[in-house]
Image: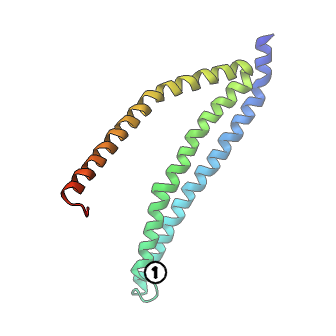
Amino acid sequence: MACWRVLKRVPRTVLAVLEVVGRWLKKAGGAIANVLLRVVSVLHTAVTAVLDFFRTITLKDVWNGVCAVLEAVFVTLPRTLWSGFKTVGEVVVMIFLGLFGFTGQLIIWLFQGLWWLAKFIPERLWMILCGIGSAFAKGFHEVMVLFNPKY
C-alpha cells in the first residue's frame, strides 16, 4: 500500500518539476538571447560609427555598447545560471515532499542540518580571521597615530 501511495504521487511531482525546469529554461534562454542581442547591437554601433566616420556616433557610444555586452556576459548570465542551480535544490525539495510527504520533510531537515554543520566551522574560522585582521588594522592605526597625531 505504501508503494502505491508513492506511485500515485509521481505524476503530480513530475508535472511540478517540469514546470520549474521550464521556467528556468525560459529565464536562461532569455539571458542568452539578451547577450546575443547586445553583441549584435555593439557590432552594429561599431560598424555604423566607422561607416559614418564617427560624426554622429562617438567612441563613447561604442564603449557603452561594449560595457553593456560585458555586463550581460559577466553579470546577468551568471546570475541567471546561478538561479538555475538554486532551482535544482528547490526541485529536489519538491520531489521529496511530493513523493514521500512527511518522511521527505524529515530527510530534507536531516540534509539541512548536515549542511549547516558543514558550513559552521568555516564560517567561524572566517569570523576569527576577520577579527584578527581588524585587530591588526586598529593596532597599526594606533601606532601611526603615535608617530603622527594628524594621521
Disc 1 on helix, strand or loop? helix
Q: Which residue is mark 1?
A: 48
Where is residue 109 shown, x and y percent of the image?
63, 23
Residue at (56% x, 60% y) in the render:
34
Residue at (58% x, 39% y) in the render:
86
**Type of amino acid at the residue the image marks with label 1:** Thr
Quadrant, the C terminus: bottom left
Res 4 quadrant in image: top right
Decide: is 44 above or below 105.
Answer: below
Quadrant, the N terminus: top right
Where is residue 96 shown, x and y percent of the image?
68, 25
Q: Is residue 25 left or right of residue 103?
A: left
Residue lying at the far left in this picture: please name it: 147
Q: Is residue 75 left or right of residue 106?
A: left
Residue lying at the far top in this picture: please name it: 1
Residue at (65% x, 40% y) in the render:
21
Decide: is 56 above or below 136.
Answer: below
